[in-house]
Each structure stands twice: as structure tokens, then as C-alpha cells.
Image: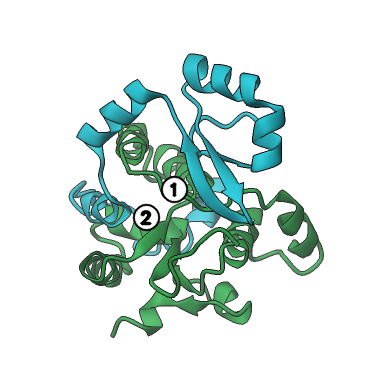
Amino acid sequence: MSDNKLMPQIVSATKARNNFAEIVNRVFYRGEEFIVQKKGKPAVLITRVKKKQEEVKRKMTSSEFLLKLATYHFKGGPKDLAKNHDKYVWE
Amino acid sequence: MINTFGSKSAIVDADALIGLIHETDALHSSCLKIAKYLHRRKFLLFIPYPIVLEAATTLAKDKTIKRPDLAARLLKDYATVEKTFFDTQVGETVAEIYQSKTSKKNTPFDYYVLACARKNNIKLVFSFDSFYEKNGLVLLKNVVK
């Protein structure tokens, strides 16, 4: 299984069963999350109880996040920064 | 296919994030209009972490900006967003669709977004890059008038 702490990792039910001890350890000690698929669709989320309780307090939806970006009030970059951001950074 | 939320889902690209943050950007007002539309309509949004990193890198490393504080703020705010369950295991697809000879204008990040959209059956993209349109996605700027 790959190492990714930010996004839940997707595993099949079979893979979850065969690696259950490892999954429990990674969830408990490293705070990772796993989604177990059933018939190709996400069915079960394995997460640390404490982490879940903390998350309930500080959740922001993706669209709220986008609107929050507009409150940064950053001005002064090139007018075409958004459109050509890769050009500005990498060249 | 992981996304089971149908047509009310969209994927977000780095130009949209930067356009929202950069208040004097030519795309800022369009970005804000689209963001409000998505919020009002309760869209399920897929904002892949590599895209957030791409936007943060622009803020931190661009020679005309150099604002790592904004990059840090972006990363911290993203860390507080509720999780959405999309399939991000698209490495094989990106490797397959990235064209080494014809991809001078678009970066592997763009192909990553395209692959994520395809894998999760997402048709709408919050971006202004016609590359996605050419590859079968619908730009939200054409939906939100």
C-alpha cells in the first residue's frame, strides 16, 4: 500500500482483510485513513476515533474553502497570473 | 468509478485557486462568481492535493510574488477541509495520456487533473484552460453566465 496521509487510501475489501493488522496500525499510529470498497464503490471508512472527533469540530466544505481564498485580499501580481501560473513559476 | 454524486460534482484546477486568491487578477471576478455558484448549488468539489501544491508553489516561488506566507495559509486552510472520497490513483492513466511531443503547453499537472476527472466520472472543471474542453470536459465558465 502506498504512503499517503492526506487523502484516504482506497482498498478493496479483500485487500483490507488480508492487511487488516497493518491497516489498524497505520490508522492508529500514523493517523492514516482507508476507504474500503465494496463492489467497486466506497463503502467503509476506517479512521482513528480521536481524529474523527477532532474533524467534526473543524470541518470546512470545499466550496467554503474556495470562498475563503477570496478573503486573502492578495493584490499586485501580474494580471495574467492565474492563467499563466506555470509559466511564471517554472521558467 | 468512485464518485457517486452524479452531475453536481466538479474538479478544481490551480488557475481557479490562484484566481480566487489574487484579487487583481484578470480572472478574479469570474472565479469568485463561479465559486459562489458552486457554494450555492452545494456542488461536491474535488480539489486534488497536488493542485493545491501547484498553487502554493506559484505563490511562494514566483519571482514577482514571493509570498510563502500566502502559500502556508493556503496549505493550512486546505488541511481543514472536510474529506471528499475521490479516487486519486491515476498514475497509470497520466502516464498513458501524457504526450511527450505535443504537450509543450500543458503540464503533467493538467494531465493529472484530466485523469482524475475521467476516473471519477466528473464532467465539469473549474478552470479556464481550453485543454480540458478539447479533452471532453466542460469549463464552468461556460456554465455560469
Q: Quadrant of the N terminus of chain B?
A: bottom right
Mark 2 is surrounded, within 10 Å at the Cα level, by few (under 14), some (14 to 19) or many (20 or more) other residues, namely: many
Tell me if B145 is positioned left or right of A26 in this view: left
Identify the chain of the residue marked 2, using the numbered disc in the image: B
Amino acid marked by disc 2? Leu
Q: Which chain is green?
A: B
Q: Are marks 1 and 2 on the same chain?
A: yes
Locate residue B100 relative to residue A67 in the image: left or right: right
At 72% from the left and 65% from the top, the residue drawn is: B103
- Quarter-wise, where is residue B6 in the image? bottom left
Amino acid type at image mark 1: Ala
Numbered tag placed on residue B55 in the rendering:
1
Q: Give the residue drawn at x 56%, y 62%.
A: B120
The residue carrying pointer 1 sits among few (fewer than 14), some (14 to 19) or many (20 or more) residues within 10 Å by Cα, namely many
Most extreme residue toward the top is A29
x then y, percent, for residue A66: 29, 55
> Where does label 2 land, which residue?
B17
Visual hue assigned to chain A? cyan
Whether residue A13 is visible, yes or no, is: yes
Residue A81 visible in the displayed image: no
Expressed as whole percent of the image width and height from the top left, the position of residue B85 reads 47, 50
Residue at image coords 76%, 53%: B92
Structural distance between the alpha carbons of marks 1 and 2:
7 Å
